[in-house]
């Protein structure tokens, strides 16, 4: 996702109050895709949690160019975000509420492959049969679902 380097001219503000002077980390641009499950099985609170996780990830990087996709059984919204306002526009356009299939996101990414995909979901849906050539991180808020491939992070309340 990116190489990090230290900037000793600007201290990391997180540690200043504790008396530690650590450098600010500068990293290369984040270039991945984020997919958000907007199916009917995802509650409004869960969708807000997913969007908060995406925003938090973007806010952690000084520079990014990411593809944001919202999908239930189809990709309904897709935005390439390079600035803070791009995420806000994506968040306002999200819709869905239908069934769940993860396949459309992977189909959408076939023409322009990404370095990695982070898919935020409850995990209930149809997984693609073919493993993509890029890394996939499933961020799942359900302990009962295990994707057939990729890495998994469990969101807990």
Image (cartoon, rainbow, N blue to C red):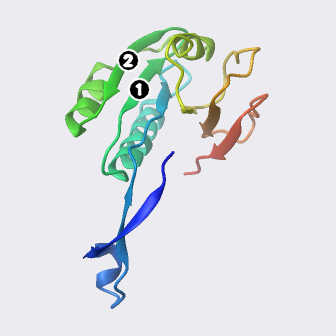
Describe the element under mark 2 as helix, strand or loop: strand
Q: Residues within 10 Å of mark 1 (few under 14, many from 20)?
A: some
Q: Which residue is mark 2?
A: 78
Q: Earlier in the sequence, mark 2 or mark 1?
A: 1
Task: Name the residue at 35% across, 75% down.
Answer: 23
Q: Is residue 59 left or right of residue 46?
A: left
Disc 2/disc 1 C-alpha distance (Å): 7 Å
**Residue 95 at least partly seen:** no
Tell me where residue 137 appears, x and y as whole percent.
62, 38
Q: Is residue 83 left or right of residue 75?
A: left
- Residue extending furthest toward the bottom: 19
Q: Is residue 90 above or below residue 27?
A: above
Q: Report the front residue among 155 and 106.
A: 106
**Residue 78 at least partly seen:** yes
Tell me where residue 96 appears, x and y as whole percent.
43, 14
Q: Is residue 25 left or right of residue 85?
A: right
Task: Name the residue at 42% across, 63% down.
Answer: 5
- Residue extending furthest toward the left: 85
- Residue 11: image quadrant is bottom left
Q: Which residue is mark 1?
A: 67
Q: Report the front residue among 146 and 31.
A: 31
Is the Cβ of the residue at disc 2 closer than 8 Å to that at disc 1?
yes
């Amino acid at each position: 996702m990116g190489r990090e380097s230290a900037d000793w001219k600007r201290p990391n503000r997180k540690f200043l109050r504790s008396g530690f002077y650590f450098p600010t980390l500068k990293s290369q641009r984040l270039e991945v895709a984020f997919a958000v499950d907007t199916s009917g099985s995802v509650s409004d609170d869960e969708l807000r949690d997913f969007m908060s996780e995406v925003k938090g990830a973007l806010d952690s990087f000084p520079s990014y160019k990411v593809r944001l996709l919202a999908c239930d059984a189809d990709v309904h919204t897709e935005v390439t975000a390079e600035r803070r306002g791009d995420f806000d526009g994506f968040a306002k356009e999200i819709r869905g509420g239908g069934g769940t299939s993860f396949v459309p996101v992977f189909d959408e990414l076939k023409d322009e492959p990404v370095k990695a995909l982070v898919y935020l979901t409850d995990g209930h849906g149809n997984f693609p049969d073919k493993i993509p050539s890029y890394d996939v991180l499933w961020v799942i808020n359900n302990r009962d679902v295990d994707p057939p491939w990729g890495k998994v992070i469990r969101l807990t309340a």
